[in-house]
């Protein structure tokens, strides 16, 4: 992996102008750059929504070429204990900032992993060095940061990028890399990433390493998850009433491909809505099916046998399909 560049880094926006979406946050941060003044900041939000990116871009725009000299990046969970953090900040804050901005930056990632005591000590450190340093604390949850720190910071809440903006970004990265990616594949990537753009970009990169022509199938393969075609065939067999065939396919998925029951159940959940294209299922039947899927899911999570639960679900699917009035294609 050493000579393969990681796309999340390669395509990490360098300056605030390159950040996709997050317009209100970018606007406020640009104002800090314009006035060259800054309170302590707290960036909070789910993983992969651009917190670290925004902190680094702010540093870049504030200091230009000198941004690395004026920025100390620490990770609260790597640096064992507050003493290490304090002494590193102390050493760093001793020298003056380079350039015309009167303070240096300390970016402290995963600040919400610090214990309450460590946060109290951090708060004192922030006060001690506030003359010539500004802190950007990064956290997933604001509520895990102690009140006295929260009240000393301007809080920025990062939301997951809207699907449209995220997909646009993925398309742009794919075009830069000369990779073909289908709309369906982008949908699957986004759905699996659940709003985490880092995860989405990593999935795109892993999929394109398998094949330059990224389809939904390739994405699933990259995720090591599920083989949609086989699962679809299994569902179709059940709908046609061929339970022996469905059972064979189920066993192949479980034992030859090594998929977990949970993965299969999730896929069935997704598929039963598109199954309506081939078999007419009325709303009551569909609702019943969804609740059966939920039941199978629950039982599997609770430790019940994957094969037995899934087979029961497929059998029910066969019965419900037979109950439907003729007329489906
Ligand atoms: N708004 C955005 N515009 C463009 N790219 C983005 C944006 N947000 C995230 N990314 C991409 O996703 C990657 C991960 O983002 P980042 O490291 O900033 O996430 P984070 O919010 O700090 O997550 P974590 O809490 O896991 O540290 C970045 O390297 C970048 O490629």
Image (cartoon, helix red, strand yellow):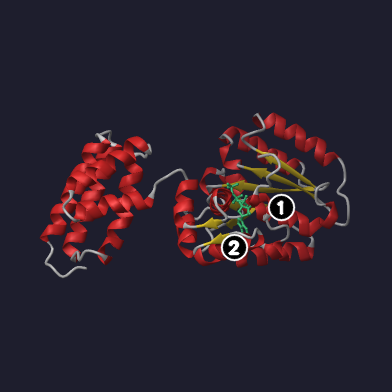
Which quadrant of the figure contains the N terminus?
top right
For disc 1, does the CB lie below 8 Å from ligand 1? yes
Residue 48 appears left or right of 194: right
Disc number placed over residue 33 in the picture, else none: none
Q: Which residue is mark 2?
A: 169
Which comes before the other along the chain, label 2 or label 1?
Answer: 1
Image quarter where the C terminus lies is bottom left
Q: Which residue is mark 1?
A: 56
What element does badge 2 sit on? helix
The structure residue drawn at horizontal position 18% and vertical position 66%, both measured from the top left corner, is 282
Is the shortest distance between ligand 1 and the CB of mark 2 under 8 Å? yes
> Whole-percent x and y of residue 51?
62, 53
Q: Nearer the viewer, residue 62 or 3?
A: 3
Q: CA distance from mark 2 to mark 1?
A: 19 Å
Q: Is residue 240 above or below residue 309?
A: below
Q: Position of residue 133 (x, y in %)?
A: 77, 47
Front residue of 317 and 80: 317
Quarter occupied by residue 244: top left
Note whether residue 152 is visible.
no
Nearest to viewer (mark 2 / mark 1): 2
What element does badge 1 sit on?
helix
Q: Are marks 2 and 1 in contact (CB under 8 Å)?
A: no
Residue 326 or residue 39, whichever sits in front: 326
Residue 17, can we see it?
Answer: yes
């Amino acid at each position: 992996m050493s000579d393969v560049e990681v796309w999340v880094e390669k395509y990490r926006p360098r300056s605030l102008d390159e950040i996709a979406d997050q317009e209100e946050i970018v606007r406020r941060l640009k104002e800090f750059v314009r006035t060259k003044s800054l309170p302590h900041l707290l960036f909070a939000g789910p993983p992969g929504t651009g917190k670290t990116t925004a902190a680094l871009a702010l540093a870049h725009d504030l200091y230009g070429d000198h941004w690395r000299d004026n920025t100390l990046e620490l990770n609260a969970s790597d640096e064992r204990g507050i003493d290490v953090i304090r002494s590193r900040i102390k050493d760093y804050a001793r020298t003056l900032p380079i350039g015309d901005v009167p303070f240096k930056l300390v970016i402290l990632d995963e600040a919400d992993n610090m214990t309450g005591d460590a946060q109290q000590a951090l708060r004192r450190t922030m006060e001690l060095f506030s003359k010539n340093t500004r802190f950007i604390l990064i956290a997933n949850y604001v509520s895990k940061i102690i009140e006295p720190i929260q009240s000393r910071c301007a809080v920025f809440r990062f939301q997951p990028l809207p699907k449209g903006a995220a997909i646009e970004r993925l398309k742009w990265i794919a075009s830069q890399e000369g990779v073909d990616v289908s709309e369906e594949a982008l949908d699957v990537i986004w759905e699996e990433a659940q709003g985490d753009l880092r995860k989405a970009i990593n999935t795109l990169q892993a999929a394109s390493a398998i094949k330059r022509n990224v389809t939904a199938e390739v994405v699933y393969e990259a995720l090591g998850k599920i083989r949609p075609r086989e699962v679809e065939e299994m569902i179709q067999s059940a709908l046609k009433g061929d339970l022996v065939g469905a059972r064979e396919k189920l066993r192949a998925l479980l034992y030859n491909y090594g998929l977990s029951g949970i993965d299969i159940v999730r896929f069935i959940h997704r598929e039963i809505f598109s199954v309506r294209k081939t078999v007419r299922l009325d709303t009551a039947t569909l609702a019943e099916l969804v609740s059966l899927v939920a039941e199978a899911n629950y039982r599997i999570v609770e430790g019940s046998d994957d094969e037995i639960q899934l087979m029961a679900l497929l059998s029910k699917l066969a019965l419900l399909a037979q109950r439907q009035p003729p007329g489906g294609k």
